[in-house]
Amino acid sequence: MAKNEKRILVKLRSTEGSGFTYYTKKNKNNSRERIELMKYDPKLRKHVMFKEEK
């Protein structure tokens, strides 16, 4: 059986310029726009906005 292709791997990069990234999956059928999440940046030691990259 084929692997579920509806979920794709996306990279979230910090907007504060630290260069830290998170990797997560999203459903490309339900969420076509790029995601933005508030997540913890361990280099800056605070919560910052992370935006999806290609």
Image (spheres, helix red, strand yellow):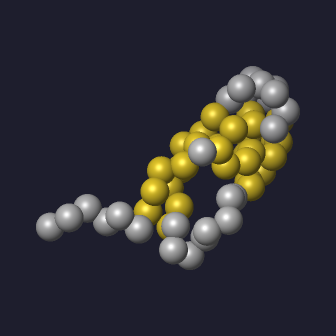
Question: Going by the image, does 44 lie left or right of 54?
Answer: right
Question: Going by the image, does 1 lie left or right of 42?
Answer: left
- Image x and y of residue 49, in percent: 81, 46
The residue at 50%/55% (across/down) is 25
Considering depth in this image, is 10 or 22 the residue closer to the camera?
10
Considering depth in this image, is 32 or 39 the residue closer to the camera?
32
The image quarter in which residue 40 lies: top right
Question: Going by the image, does 4 lie left or right of 26?
Answer: left
Q: Quadrant of the N terminus?
A: bottom left
- Image x and y of residue 18, in percent: 77, 25
Q: Is residue 45 above or below residue 22?
A: above
- Residue with the most extreme bottom position: 30
- Image x and y of residue 10, in percent: 54, 49
Considering depth in this image, is 52 or 21 the residue closer to the camera?
52
The residue at 31%/66% (across/down) is 4
The residue at 60%/45% (across/down) is 54
The image quarter in which residue 5 lies: bottom left
